[in-house]
Amino acid sequence: MIYTVTLNPSVDLTVEVEDFQLDRLNRSSRELKFPGGKGINVSRVLHRIGAETTALGFIGGFTGRFIRDSLIREGIHVDFIEVEEDSRINIKLKSPGGGETEINGSGPTIPGHHFRQFLAKLDSIPEGEMIVLAGSIPRSLPVNLYEELTKKCSGRGIHAVVDAAGTALLHVVKHKPFLIKPNHHELGELFGVTFQSVNEILPYGMRLVEMGVRNVIVSMAEKGALFFSREGIYSANVPQGKVVNSVGAGDSLVAGFIGTYAKTGDLLKAFQYGVAAGSATAFSRDLCTKEEIEALYPQVQIQKI
Ligand SMILES: Nc1ncnc2c1ncn2[C@@H]1O[C@H](COP(=O)(O)OP(=O)(O)OP(=O)(O)O)[C@@H](O)[C@H]1O
Ligand SMILES: O=P(O)(O)OC[C@@]1(O)O[C@H](CO)[C@@H](O)[C@@H]1O
């Protein structure tokens, strides 16, 4: 079982506007609503590729019910804590000339007693399982929560996967997570540098492995991805296709990687499948399906650096 934690789930409201104008009434040509948040996206893709997953976190109100019911309808196990305030709505505005503009809500306050309930749930996850901690941490929860949870999980033999940015990620590293997936901007922020080329990224990715992270994937959107582990450094290209929606591409990469690794134990196959999953999501309106991933998989070439 792969558990995912989304501390601040969302209803992702995608609005397509043909010719978006600021300070005007705009009318959308299409609206779509999805259950969202990074951990939830990982669970949705894991389920689609046949991996057993349970989504954990906090939901509330009518938006929370939408999130929970949508996931249950897809056949995903959920074990959320219900809070009093509504889960947030995140707006994803797409316009042909203007690309993708996102406005993410701040989300509900998590009262102390609900937080303690959540921690007790995590304590019941058995040894040997995998847990994905992904997405922003609500303001009402400790800023170092991912660090604390990774420490706890590593100590109990649970494999932690962390997709976070900034100091939240930096402090996680020393607790030896199984996987982290910064994009190249997030990796640069971690070390206070800006990368001009792929070659400049290599020593920093490897440094994370030396600090104890077992696997590191640095995603670089249309430029592909890099994989770092004790066995070496590998690069992957991305397949050809038309980008429709990059929301959730990084989460799909994570899901493709851990779902394939859980099934095969093969890290390079997992990397290849993960990159195909990221691109399959970038090329579709919703998250990718298994068929879409498998159509792209042969186009992803993995090379040792
Ligand atoms: N323009 C693109 N063309 C092809 N594949 C893409 C594109 N953008 C993203 N991808 C795929 O998705 C993966 C993750 O993308 P990216 O590096 O943008 O992650 P991210 O910043 O975590 O994304 P997000 O936060 O939008 O989910 C890439 O490694 C690639 O496989
Ligand atoms: O505000 P956060 O938690 O950083 O990110 C939330 C979010 O933008 O991430 C997902 C895509 O990765 C979306 O489903 C969701 O709306």
Image (spheres, grey):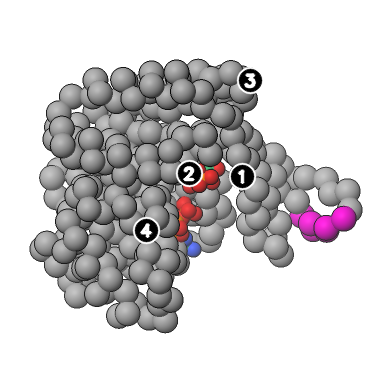
Along the polypeptide, which appears first: circle 3 or circle 2?
3
Along the polypeptide, which appears first: circle 1 or circle 2?
1
Which mark identifies residue 136?
Answer: 2
2 and 4 marks in contact (CB < 8 Å): no
Q: Position of residue 15 (x, y in %)?
A: 70, 44
Image point (35%, 33%), residue name? 4
Between marks 3 and 2 in the image, the one whose residue lies nearer the viewer: 2
Q: Which residues are magenta?
A: 18-23
3 and 2 marks in contact (CB < 8 Å): no
Indicate if the residue with disc 1 has its beta carbon within 8 Å of ligand 2. yes
Which mark identifies residue 62?
Answer: 3
Q: Which residue is mark 4?
A: 182
Indicate if the residue with disc 4 has its beta carbon within 8 Å of ligand 1. no
Q: Which residue is mark 1?
A: 104
Q: Nearer the viewer, residue 11 or 44?
A: 11
Which amino acid type is shown beneath numbered disc 3? Phe
